[in-house]
Amino acid sequence: MTILAAVAVAQSVNMSSPTNGATVNANSVDIASAAASTTATAYQDNFNATSQWVSQFSQSDGSILYVPGQIEPYFANIGAIGMTKDPNRMPQVVAWMKWYMNHLNWPDKWGIYGTMYNYTVSNGVETPSDDCDSTDSYASTFLTLTWNAWQSGNTNARSYIKTLSYQLDVIGGVLIQTQQSDGLTWAKPDYQIKYLMDNAEGYRGLRDLALLYKNAFGDASKAAYYNAAADSMQNGVKSMWMNGKWAVYKNYYGDLIGPDLGTWYPDASSQVFPVLMGVVPASDSRAAILCGVQCGMAGLADAFV
């Protein structure tokens, strides 16, 4: 059982006042509270162990390795997002954010400012690849990382973030410049495919940037601007729902390409992203596709037995 499930169980216990004829089962409350506490402790222990494992890839200059000799900022952003939930790892988080800022392209090979390339590392020398897997997801996951770092309440993180209003606006512009009239963004300027995963992450990044401008910078105008862009992307992602499943991507010609739920990446795994990134709530009927993903993965697993 996850901690969220344990909390839900605890909250479902009948706590009605005896004055209205209901009774309170103290033993049930104690059991639910104990279960939630035990689960929370186990969850935090596992989380801390994972955080410790991820932190070993943090380098002295702030970079986070994907594998030895390789920096892929997308995966580093995701790892750092996780580390924001562990107060002991905030120095590594801030160090990574500074590395990212110091390696932004001004501009890149497409003429866009604020993008990020992958890097190779050899004998301590970092060399840009002059390319990346995507421009949209690199930018959006960094914006989400920054919001999570702000939410951590860490004093050093907040002080640093307060210096980044201009740079974050430029990074937000990476998404705006590849966002199309249907609200969706290309993976990158020369790869004009609109992926479900990327756009769900893009939505989250734009929404998180709006939250930063509202809460960290007190800029209502910028917050409204990025919320409007997020609304457009949200509508675009919702338009990718087809025949009871989410399209994996929309191609150059505007065709929606559906998933094979027996294929983990990107087909089945992409189905989680609209809920994971808040495009649709877990209560939405379209979230039921997650049950199909589980069944599809069960079938895939059986194939390897």
Image: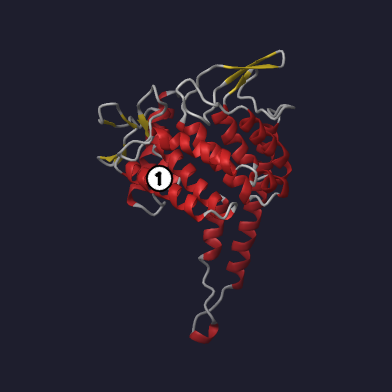
Q: Is residue 295 visible?
A: yes
Q: Residue furthest bottom?
A: 19
Residue 1 visible here:
no
Of 272 and 197, nearer the camera is 197
Which residue is pictured at 54% across the width and 42% down the height?
Answer: 144
Q: Is residue 156 left or right of residue 264?
A: right
Answer left or right for 59 relative to 299: right
Asked where in the image residue 244 lies, by quadrant, the reply is top left
Image coords of residue 152 (percent x, y): 65, 50
Residue found at x 49% / y 85%: 20
Q: Residues within 10 Å of mark 1 (few under 14, many from 20)?
A: many
Taking 233 as reference, is 66 left or right? right
**Residue positioned 57% across, 73% down in the render:** 25
Query: In the rendering, at what x and y percent does residue 61 appear?
Result: 72, 27
- Where does label 1 land, which residue? 229
When the figure is inspected, residue 87 is found, relative to residue 264, above or below; the finding is: below
The mark tally for this picture is 1
Q: The residue tagged with tag 1: helix, strand or loop? A: helix
Closer to us: 58 or 136: 136
**Residue 37 x/y as whole percent:** 65, 57
Left or right of residue 239: residue 62: right
Q: How is the image coloured?
A: secondary structure
In front here: 180 or 60? 180
Q: Quadrant of residue 145?
A: top right
Name which quarter of the figure residue 31 lies in.
bottom right
Q: Percent position (x, y) of residue 55?
A: 69, 33
Q: Please, what is the three-letter code of the amino acid marked with disc 1?
A: Ala
Quadrant where the C terminus is found in the figure: top left
